[in-house]
Amino acid sequence: MSAGRGSSGRDGPTGRAARRRRDAHDDAVTRQRLLRAATRLFSERGFGAVTVRELCREARANLAAVNYHFGGKLGLYREVVENALAGVRDDPTIDVPDGTPAEERLRHYIRTYVPRLAAPRGRAVWAQKLMRHEMTDPTPLAPWIAQEVILPRVRFLSEAVAELLGTDVEDERVGRCVVSLQAQCLFYLPNRFREVAFPGWRDTSDEAIAAAADHIAAFTLAGIRRTKEQPPCPARRSADKPPHPGASGH
Amino acid sequence: MSAGRGSSGRDGPTGRAARRRRDAHDDAVTRQRLLRAATRLFSERGFGAVTVRELCREARANLAAVNYHFGGKLGLYREVVENALAGVRDDPTIDVPDGTPAEERLRHYIRTYVPRLAAPRGRAVWAQKLMRHEMTDPTPLAPWIAQEVILPRVRFLSEAVAELLGTDVEDERVGRCVVSLQAQCLFYLPNRFREVAFPGWRDTSDEAIAAAADHIAAFTLAGIRRTKEQPPCPARRSADKPPHPGASGH
DNA sequence: GGATGTTTAAAACAATCGTTTGACCTGTCA
DNA sequence: TGACAGGTCAAACGATTGTTTTAAACATCC
């Protein structure tokens, strides 16, 4: 391949393009190329599955560049993660004016979050994909990423759901509803499950995503209203096994 | 490469009689120890993150045993996957007597599926965890696993949901409801998200899991009923403004 | 008992991993 | 100008990867 790319064209001390001035701008360029390639590759395949060599090839940088600029593979990864997390820290999806009713807060969350997840790129997607990899095989940065991405959302959602249920955030029904909501949203991160299960769903237009978000919102709010009707501590009925007889809830 | 015997052919010719005689060292025993350790490690950390050495150490087998018995690391992985998939092929969660009403079919699915996912082990858990890894970084077996695990469930769920919606399985609302349902269930696979988000959810007793399944069932059926009220092709209303202006930038 | 075939054991294999090295180039500043 | 610092480069480092090899231990058959 083009592994030995530049050397062939630039080896001559008088390479024409290589003649351009080397200002302080130039060094930052490879740094940024590395960061860009690393963001894509790490979020796509995870920390362990990406090799430094592949990364440098993609960024058209020398093999030693990663260690020089970032002190190592993990240092580069840390910077990638920091960039991605910066995008979820000031997060419009959980930023709504005071006094907005709970139902509207949830609707707003879903309608801004789902399009962000379904987008081909963007910091929200990167952060969530990085976290998805940290969930399955964690790096030393896993706890940090998880807390940073998850906790603010859970707090926001729990408060809204608790308000809708007319209870406090400690109620276990709140956690279950929050999980039901977040699970639905996360499924709109690009993933192979949807591709396999619904090959016809290649429509990722804004309208299709918005329609899906509307579905989740309506679906979830109905589910929450239904949950509200149930007793707070659903002491388990003992005789609940067979599917056939009329075990249709109550 | 295939100097060792292939994974599939080894059981046949004269092996059966010769087997089962060695007292101290029994071939079938180390084979099974390897399979057991591999099932645990592969489903926990994925194919790429597990080394052959670690595997053999865990199984108290020699390093060469993997290549001897399974023809290589991938051969062992293939056998692990086959075992796990055998457990989802004849699947009680989607096996329900004819004539069962759709709502009851879904309830049965959720109430049998969620406890299987939440269990610490079992073939359903292994299959689903293996697939989770195949989703994030795939091996050559990824398409096979995905189809085998996903398609039967999607078909079962789609038919039931379509019946509840009073429409056919091609309706896009069906797919969205199936995703909403399946996404909720899959969140009860042991995962770090729940641990981080809800540290208090360490209760994995049968009662707690059953209560969670009941929640999902009630939540989902309410969501489906709500979805039924909406027009089949929800053309996006334009007068749908976010809580505060400017937040829906794009 | 020797021949044959199967399983285990330890060592070595080539390939690849992340990282380090030292020469080399270029611009800056004394 | 000459020394220095910043940055790139090819090459090599030691460690670890999956796999292969070679020899020995064991069981079975003639």
Image (cartoon, coloured by chain):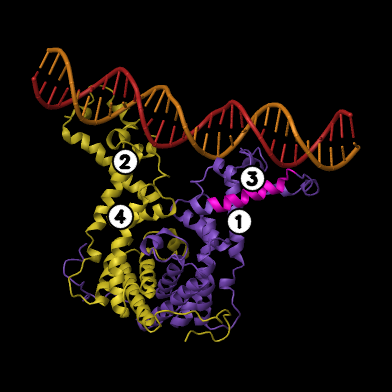
Chain colours: A yellow, B purple, C red, D orange
**Seen in the image, is A124 located left or right of residue B223?**
left
Give the Cα distance between marks 4 and 1. 35 Å
The answer to whether dots 3 and 1 both sit on one chain is: yes
Compute the Cα span from label 3 to label 1: 13 Å
Mark pair 4, 2: CA separation? 22 Å
Image: magenta residue range = B24-41
Q: Name the residue under label 4.
A: A121
Decide: marks 4, 1 in contact (CB < 8 A)?
A: no
Badge 3 is on which residue? B70
In front: C19, or B137?
Answer: C19
Residue B82 disc label:
1
- Callout 3 crowding tier (Cα within 10 Å): few <14, some 14–19, many ≥20: many
Eye-nearest disc, 3 or 4: 3
Q: What residue type is labelled 1?
A: Glu
Label 2: chain?
A
Q: Which quadrant, please, contains the C terminus of chain B?
A: bottom left
Chain of the residue on which disc 1 is drawn: B
The quarter of the picture where residue A9 lies is top left
The answer to whether residue A61 of the structure is visible from this angle is no
* Distance of label 2 from label 3 (alpha carbons): 38 Å
Choose mark 4 or mark 2, whichever is in front.
Answer: 2
